[in-house]
Amino acid sequence: MKFLTLSQAPQLMPTVAHWYFDTWGARVPGHTFDDEQQRLEVFLHDNELPMLLMAMQDDTPIAAAQLKFHERTEHPQRLHWLGGVFVTPEHRGHDLASEMIETLMQKARGYGVREVFLQTEHDDGGLYKRLGWEPLERQTHRTGVPVRIMRRVLPLAG
């Protein structure tokens, strides 16, 4: 599978923004597609975090995932977050999300990241639990949806 960062293919930003807006962003009162696209601009740089990784099939993006900063502001010490894990419906069920997450975790280790957090609507942790994430606590997302906060400690690079 070929992976590109958003900075390597910025013309794909509207596609990813549509995925995110249709899946999550439309739930947020007053949030627009343009807002979603603007939020992705932080990923338009090379060789540093935050990073948005896309899985490609030929020249078409089929999945995306982010390694970003401060998903939740109530715990400022929780710096690095996995988010925006999305696989197009026709490509689900083939371990693509797992492969993307593991690729992002390898990149995170290369940047010296030691722990990564995430939030999921799946209370049991689902895929993330199988990939070594540990549950921390339940919280409520700003949309009112309950989420499970999870953490994964990364081994030192090298």
Image: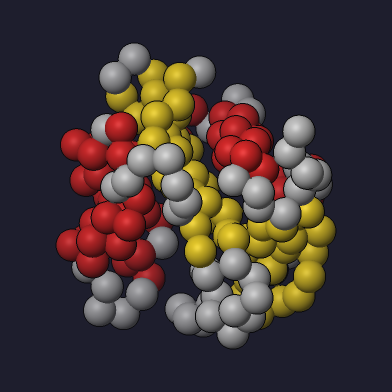
Query: Can residue 1 be seen?
Result: yes
Q: Is residue 79 above or below residue 11?
A: below
User: Is 41 placed left or right of 140 in the picture?
Assistant: left
Q: Residue furthest top?
A: 58
**Camera-side residue of 144 and 80:** 80
Q: Which image quarter: residue 60?
A: top left
Q: Could you say where residue 106 lies in the image, as x and y percent from the top left?
A: 65, 36
Which colour assignment does the render follow? secondary structure
Q: Could you say where residue 92 lies in the image, as x and y percent from the top left?
A: 54, 32
Q: Count the labels in the image.
A: 0
Residue at 29%, 19% (x, y): give it.
59
Q: Residue furthest bottom?
A: 74
Q: Could you say where residue 123 lies in the image, as x and y percent from the top left?
A: 73, 64
Residue at 31%, 79% (x, y): give it.
29
Q: Could you say where residue 149 lies in the image, as x and y percent from the top left?
A: 69, 68
Quadrant of image for the C terminus:
top right
User: Is 110 placed left or right of 144 in the picture?
Assistant: right
Residue at 18%, 62% (x, y): give it.
34
User: Is 58 placed left or right of 11 in the picture?
Assistant: right
Q: Is residue 90 above or below residue 13?
A: above
Query: Can residue 108 be seen?
Result: no
Residue at 50%, 18% (x, y): give it.
1
